[in-house]
Amino acid sequence: MSENNSWHVCSLIVQVKPENISKVSEALCALPGTEIPGVNENEGKLIVVMQADNSDVLFAQIESTRDLAGVLAVSLVYHQQDEQGEDTP
């Protein structure tokens, strides 16, 4: 199956300075396929979920997360690739 028929999802822990949580959260949510289901404001930790149709796109988004101002560390917790079958009648 080609790369075009796959789906990738990952979860990250993004460590930021607590005073930067709003700014970093806004920048992350601007990335396609990205959401933040959990935040610990006291510790400056964000749980981030990203998804994409292509692993290169997903890994580029992870790298761009590392480059955001205020981000101290990014830890990949989980990654899954799922092959999408063709549903043609």
Image (cartoon, helix red, strand yellow):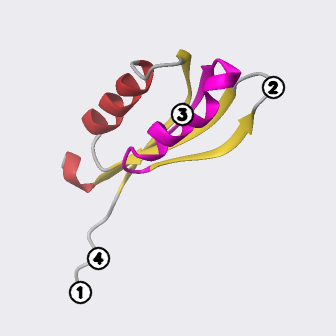
Which residue does the image show at 61% across and 20% down from the upper left?
16
Q: Secondary structure at mark 4?
A: loop
Q: Which residue is mark 3?
A: 23
Query: Compared with residue 6, is residue 49 higher up or lower down, i.e. above or below?
Result: above
**Amino acid, disc 2:** Asn
Disc sitting over residue 87 in the figure:
4
Q: Is residue 3 left or right of residue 53?
A: left
* Residue contact between numbered discs 3 and 1, judged by CB atoms under 8 Å: no
Q: Earlier in the sequence, mark 3 or mark 2?
A: 3
Residue kind at label 4, given as amino acid type? Asp
Mark before the other along the chain sequence, 4 or 2: 2
Residue 10, given in percent of the width and then of the height, sits at 50, 38
Task: Let me know if residue 1 appears in the view.
Answer: no
For the residues labelled 3 and 4, the Cα–Cα distance comes to 41 Å
Horizontal arrangement in the rendering, residue 43 relative to residue 1 (left or right): right
**In the depicted view, which residue is nearer to us: 82 or 28?**
28
Q: Position of residue 78 (x, y in %)?
A: 56, 32
Residue, disc 2: 42
